[in-house]
């Protein structure tokens, strides 16, 4: 009601994506980006050494995800440098 006229609050909302990538649908910040196992399953994880954001349960999964992750890794690193 307060923002029915399209004020500040509605201008801050991003459009909802029409298609959600399954990787994002099951993303959890404390789980392996590839297999989704993590602390809640007793599986230790480590962060990507480049961006320090995305986690993996082992180097095999990090290598397997690299083709997808490399672009995001650059974005995350660039964001960290501006903070």
Image: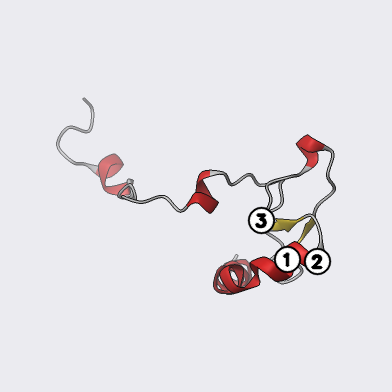
Q: Nearer the viewer, residue 12 or 75?
A: 75
Q: Nearer the viewer, residue 47 or 68?
A: 68
- Marks 2 and 1 sit apart, C-alpha to C-alpha, by 5 Å
Q: What residue would you read off at disc 3?
A: 34
- Marks 1 and 3 sit apart, C-alpha to C-alpha, by 8 Å
Q: Position of residue 61 (x, y in %)?
A: 73, 62
Label 1: which secondary element: helix
Q: Quadrant of the C terminus?
A: bottom right
Q: Residues within 10 Å of mark 2 (few under 14, many from 20)?
A: few
Rendering colour mode: secondary structure
Label 3: which secondary element: loop
Q: What residue would you read off at disc 2?
A: 59
Q: Position of residue 41 (x, y in %)?
A: 79, 37
Lower sequence index among marks 2 and 3 = 3
> Given contact means CB atoms under 8 Å apart, are the residues at marks 2 and 1 in contact?
yes
Horizontal side, residue 79 vs residue 45: left or right: left
Horizontal side, residue 11 vs residue 50: left or right: left
């Amino acid at each position: 009601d307060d923002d029915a006229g399209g004020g500040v609050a509605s201008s801050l909302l991003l459009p909802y994506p029409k298609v959600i990538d399954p990787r994002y649908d099951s993303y959890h910040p404390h789980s392996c980006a590839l297999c989704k196992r993590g602390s809640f399953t007793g599986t230790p994880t480590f962060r990507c050494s480049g961006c320090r954001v995305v986690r993996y349960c082992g180097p095999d999964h990090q290598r397997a995800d690299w083709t997808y992750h490399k672009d995001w890794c650059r974005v995350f690193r660039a964001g960290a440098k501006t903070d």
